[in-house]
Amino acid sequence: MEIPKDYEEALIVAKKIGLPVEKICHIFGIKRKLIITTITEAREAFHKAPSGSEEEKEALKKWISLCSTTTEAQEIYRSTPSGSEEEKEALKKWVSLCSTIAEAHEAYHDAPSESEEEKEALKKWVSLCSTIADIQEAYHDAPGDNREETFEKWLSLCSTAAEAHEAFNNAPNSNKEEALKRWKELSAKEIEKASTAAEARKAFNNAPRDNKEEAFEKWISLCSTITEAHEAYRNTPSGSEEEKEALKKWEELSAKEIEKASTVAEAREVYHNAPGGSKEKKEAFEKWFSLCSTTAEAREAFNNAPNSNKEETLKKWKELSAKEIEKASTVAETQEAYGNTPSGSKEEKEALKKIILLS
């Protein structure tokens, strides 16, 4: 029997002397002819081949080429020696097969720190991100020197001024200018698009400093109630031109709502929402007071009256009390009138007398 020169001869020798063909091939440097068509065959061939042999490398190469899922690629990756070229190839295949954020995230965390493979896994992770929440997780997880590219994806996903504002606050120094530009662009679109005071208020709150004035002007222009104008006023710096503009709008809307008020409830609401100390506040009270037709309404107006209106309000209250006492025809009606009369007034005394007489 001669020394085997190829795999077929090695098989004959192996059968005759009872040694594994792999061992004989390894000793004599014979390359085994691998006929592998399935991943199961490739896995088996890899584990049977002598460690470090050409057969092992060939089987691994075939195993990697046949895997089609991340689970299969993970198994290969964890079967290869740490730091080896084979490990790198297996990890590359794993990354290439990732189709979800969860898969890419796992590959990223399994990759050797600061390696090219880690960078590739991060790129794949970032490429799969489709929402702000997704990219934020990748950005905060990424090493400092890999954050710029990740941040660019974050910024590209921003569709509102609020999102761009948050991105700006988290931007690396090298991306600050780009982030501010995006924030301004989205803010300008929101300001232009706003068609209600609520939308304009939101645009104002989300605007960068350079867009604040434009946003505030839009907000003021859309205010149609004193409540809206009051809120705009409260958001202006004290003593600013914006504060003066907001106060003017607030007063104008108060005057309109005073004129429109036709019930005690409407006039009372205008009074409570009108600018403090303004002529509109005084006029709103006078409208409220003028609409009172019962002692209960007059009593409430008196309790809320400015000092300058106390006397005339009390007079109106007493007049209405006198009418209700006169109108009352039962003890119950008189008692109700008595409960709504000014304390210590002659009307209170008259009501009490009538209660006694009717009892």
Image (tube, helix red, strand yellow):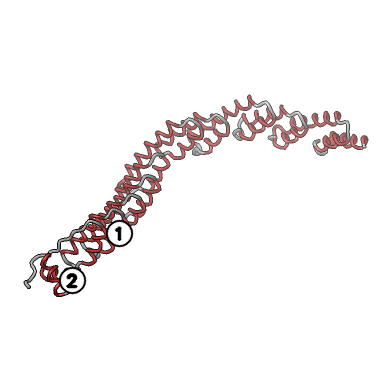
Question: Quick one: quadrant of the N terminus?
Answer: bottom left
Looking at the image, residue 113 lies above or below residue 168:
below
SS of the residue at dot 1? Answer: helix
Looking at the image, residue 331 lies above or below residue 110:
above
Residue 16 vs residue 144, the one in the foreground? 16
The residue type indicated by label 1 comes to Gln
- Residue 20 image label: 2
Q: Given this view, does label 1 or label 2 mark the residue nearer the observer?
A: 2
Question: Quick one: quadrant of the C terminus?
Answer: top right
Asked whether, in this view, residue 121 is left or right of residue 199, the answer is left
Q: What separation in Å lies between label 1 and label 2 (alpha carbons)?
A: 29 Å
Q: Where is residue 329 in the image (x, y as percent from the top left)?
A: 88, 31
Residue beneath disc 1? 74
Circle nearer the N terminus (1, 2): 2
Residue 292 vs residue 8, the one in the foreground? 8
Q: Where is residue 230 in the image (x, y as percent from the top left)?
A: 56, 35
SS of the residue at dot 2? Answer: loop
Residue at the image position 40 percent from the left and 34 percent from the top: 188
Q: Which image quadrant for residue 323?
A: top right
Residue at the image position 67 percent from the left and 26 percent from the top: 262
Q: Where is residue 325 in the image (x, y as percent from the top left)?
A: 85, 31
